[in-house]
């Protein structure tokens, strides 16, 4: 059994919920957890990271940082990190699990070592995701890079001095973020030129926010196409606190908006650089009753919703949760400009369209958009594929809560990648699940 009391690997049976009612505290942010832990390890001395996430991605970052020589002590909900500064241990094999941001950020920093090799057990997920744009930028800086056609396993080695370098931001913002973490520790720093269409601006601003929190000077053009970080700097922060997680909360908010009841969800600060805070505005635009009381959102569920058309790139990690709400909204909802969704843990455009259709919903896709036509009822009584993707599992779960008959989701344990307490949180609101152990990975 795992810490959440659930089987190590399981399929979940989602029973329809008549009502969701109660209070929850949003879990710690995945994006800020990975950033603060890495920055703390790049500092010399000790940093307390208050309220870190306990997800698989957080554990992956902690594991890799320890392998690189950081001291990690978990004290209650906090992680106390003794950093290795600009000298991660050389000759190490790092395993980032299935965590894309962890893998990318560490591949950038690996230019501080003579050689670091990155491997993964998730050949069909992280192993398939593209790394070429980051590797090209690292090679332009003089790093030695070897890969399997731009995919893991990958070895990166320095030293590099820094300077002017271009990096494409069209497939992922994580490549640029990776170089931003490396930059201040290089002799010459980095003058980053982000090329092609820049996607996922919000995580780039979260990276800038993290550098500032650790005393690192950086300047960026308003459109983020140019980011300049002087070299010879040091990371330093005594203590940082991880804010609440908007991407995972978007699934809870979608559930609360589509099922009758009242939810109070706290620990979601109004001023926050996570793009997925926009999920609140989108749900309101759809007709949901959501009121903010400071850092708490109050949702009164069950109101009729209507479709919207939105550019989804600004809240990429909330698109699937919002799709679950859109599946019950009158009309056809379209998320535009979401091509990067094809490059996540699964192809979140085609695989989501397929699962929606499997549940009897009308859905469509183009190269960079996903649409769903809402239906008053979802029949349920089917087994859906979780695709090993935490956000697909959350989408399907929210649909199951509203279905006429139970929905079974395969590989539901993969929700632990970002939200280990997801099912327990919904149970606290009155949802009912069955957990069926499985030998499937
Ligand atoms: O920088 C980050 O922490 C992240 C950036 C986003 O990825 P892309 O930049 O690839 O869209 C997001 O989907 C991911 O969950 C986390
Ligand atoms: C894609 C995600 O994360 P990552 O890119 O870090 O794997 C996500 O959290 O939805």
Image (spheres, rainbow, N blue to C red):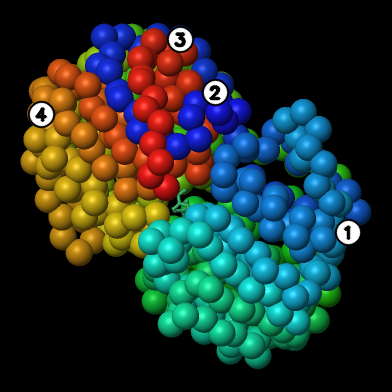
> Which sits in the foreground, 51 or 275?
51
Mark 1: few, some, or many residues within 10 Å (few <14, many ≥20)? many
Q: Is residue 275 visible?
A: yes
Determine whether, in the image, residue 68 is placed left or right of residue 364.
right
In the image, residue 261 lies at what x, y percent? 33, 9
Asked which secondary structure carries label 3, the reply is strand
Q: Earlier in the sequence, mark 2 or mark 3?
A: 2
Give the CA distance from mark 1 to mark 3.
43 Å
Label 3: which residue?
Answer: 22
Residue that mark 1 sits on: 44
Residue at the front extreme of this rendering: 439
- On screen, residue 116 versus residue 360, left or right, reads right
Residue 414: give x, y in percent of width and height. Answer: 44, 42
- Under circle 2, the secondary element is loop
* Residue that carries the numbered disc 4 in the rendered image: 375
Label 2 vs label 3: CA separation? Answer: 21 Å
Q: Earlier in the sequence, mark 2 or mark 1?
A: 2
């Amino acid at each position: 059994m795992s810490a959440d009391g659930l089987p190590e690997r399981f399929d979940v049976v989602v029973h329809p919920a008549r009502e969701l009612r109660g209070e929850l505290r949003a879990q710690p942010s995945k994006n800020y957890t990975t950033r603060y832990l890495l920055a703390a390890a790049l500092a010399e001395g000790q940093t307390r990271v208050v309220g870190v996430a306990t997800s698989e991605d957080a554990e992956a970052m902690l594991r890799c940082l320890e392998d690189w020589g950081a001291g990690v002590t978990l004290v209650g909900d906090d992680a106390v990190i003794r950093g290795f500064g600009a000298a991660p241990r050389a000759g190490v094999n790092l395993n980032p699990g299935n965590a894309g941001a962890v893998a990318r950020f560490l591949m950038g920093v690996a230019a501080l070592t003579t050689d670091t090799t990155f491997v993964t057990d998730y050949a069909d997920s992280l192993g398939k995701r593209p790394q070429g744009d980051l590797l090209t930028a690292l090679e332009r800086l003089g790093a030695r890079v070897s890969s399997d056609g731009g995919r893991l396993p990958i070895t990166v080695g320095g030293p590099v001095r820094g300077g002017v370098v271009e990096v494409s931001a069209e497939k992922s913002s994580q490549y640029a973020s990776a170089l931003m973490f490396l930059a201040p520790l290089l002799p010459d720093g980095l003058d980053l030129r982000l090329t092609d269409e820049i996607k996922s601006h919000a995580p780039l601003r979260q990276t800038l926010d993290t550098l500032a929190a650790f005393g690192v000077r950086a300047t960026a053009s308003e459109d983020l196409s140019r980011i300049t970080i002087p070299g010879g700097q040091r990371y330093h922060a005594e203590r940082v606190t991880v804010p609440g997680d908007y991407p995972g909360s978007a699934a809870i908010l979608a559930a609360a908006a589509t099922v009758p009841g009242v939810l109070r969800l706290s620990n979601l600060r109004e001023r926050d650089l996570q793009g997925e805070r926009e999920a609140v505005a989108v749900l309101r635009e759809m007709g949901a009753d959501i009121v903010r009381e400071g850092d708490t959102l109050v949702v009164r569920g069950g109101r009729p919703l209507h479709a919207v058309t939105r550019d989804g790139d600004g809240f990429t990690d909330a698109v699937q949760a919002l799709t679950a709400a859109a599946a019950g909204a009158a009309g056809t909802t379209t998320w535009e400009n979401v091509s990067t969704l094809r490059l996540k843990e699964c192809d979140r455009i085609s695989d989501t369209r397929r699962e929606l259709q499997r549940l009897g919903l009308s859905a469509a896709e183009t190269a960079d958009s996903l649409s769903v036509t809402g239906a008053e009822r979802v029949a349920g009584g089917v087994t859906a594929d979780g695709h090993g993707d935490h956000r697909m599992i959350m989408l399907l779960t929210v649909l199951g809560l509203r279905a006429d008959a139970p929905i079974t989701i395969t590989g539901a344990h993969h929700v632990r990648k970002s939200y280990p307490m997801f099912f327990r949180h919904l149970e606290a609101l009155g949802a009912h699940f069955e957990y069926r152990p499985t030998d499937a990975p």
